[in-house]
Amino acid sequence: MAAGSASTSRRAGARTVAVWDALDPVLAAGPLDVLDIGGGTGTSAVRIAGLGHRVIVVDPSPDALAALDRRAREAGVSVDARQGDLAALSDVADPGGADLVLCHGVLEVVPDPAEALAGIREVLRPGGTLSLLVAQRTAAVLSRALAGHFAQAAELLDDTAPQGRSGRRFALDEVRGLLETAGFAVGDVRGVRVFVDHVPGSLLDVDPGATNALVELEQRASTRADYLPLASQLHLLASLRS
């Protein structure tokens, strides 16, 4: 594997460890019906299907769904791929048909986040769980300031509007408010990518033990409230209120 590819692979583990630490106990509950919204090429879906769960991926890109099909076949698992998007979820997903819904990196780009969450509520079964991963505004401000883009950082401080292809960014209180208004009770909250985005890839190549140490650091920091504002993303588990 080339040095660049190795560094990217190492980073991937550190970037996602907090999400899987939160999801693993949910997935351990037994065979679940899982709906992955915007699941793209199936990075999460294939892993979950490999654990014995029934997985549906909804994504607007036919190319991404074709790549998902190839990945699933190579892994020897079955994933139901459906073309569609969160804005019209009821067209491709059954009401009350999912025990677990993954909405990772999608709420940022929908026209109306509140309406999107209301749609997700409709496809969850009573007692179902939503896994929500969103970009956090404070980290975007910090990264721009550290890069010397001070005017851009200042513009983002209080800006809740979508920003180009990357979409909108959220503060934790905003996400909590959206979820509670949509009828969800927020449980586990973790910071994702607290440090990894600031670590040079060359460091992971030079020091064989750096990756494991970084993963452990991300795990420990992810559940600490004082480090949540530094995280590039926020991961929340939410359940339907009865």
Image (tube, grey):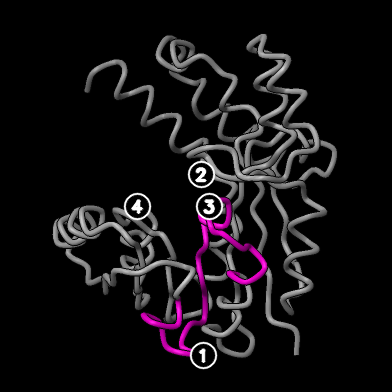
Q: Which mark is residue 16?
A: 2
Q: Position of residue 96 (x, y in %)?
A: 51, 90
Looking at the rendered image, the disc whose residue lies closer to the viewer, 3 or 4, is 3
- CA gap between label 2 and label 3 equals 20 Å
- Measure the alpha-carbon separation of dots 3 and 4: 20 Å
- Seen at 22% across and 23% down, the residue is 1
- Residue density around tag 3, few if under 14, some if 14–19, many if 20 or more, within 10 Å: some
Nearer-N-terminus badge (2/3):
2
Whether the magenta-drawn stretch holds residue 190 is answered as no
**Image point (47%, 80%), residue name:** 30
The kind of residue on which mark 2 rests is Thr
Q: Mark 1 vs mark 3: which is more N-terminal?
A: 1
Q: Is residue 135 left or right of residue 96?
A: right
As drawn, 94 above or below 86: below
Q: Residue at x 52, y 39 (%)?
A: 166
Residue 186: % across, % down: 75, 68
Secondary-structure class at tag 2: helix
- For mark 1, what is the residue? 96
**Crowding at label 4, few (<14), some or many (≥20) Cα neighbours within 10 Å?**
few
Mark number, residue 104: none
Give, as a three-letter code, the residue at label 4.
Thr
Q: Which residue matches tag 4? A: 43
Range covered by the magenta-colored residues? 89-116
User: What residue did someone put label 3 on?
Assistant: 109
Calculate the distance from the C-alpha at mark 1 to the C-alpha at mark 4. 24 Å
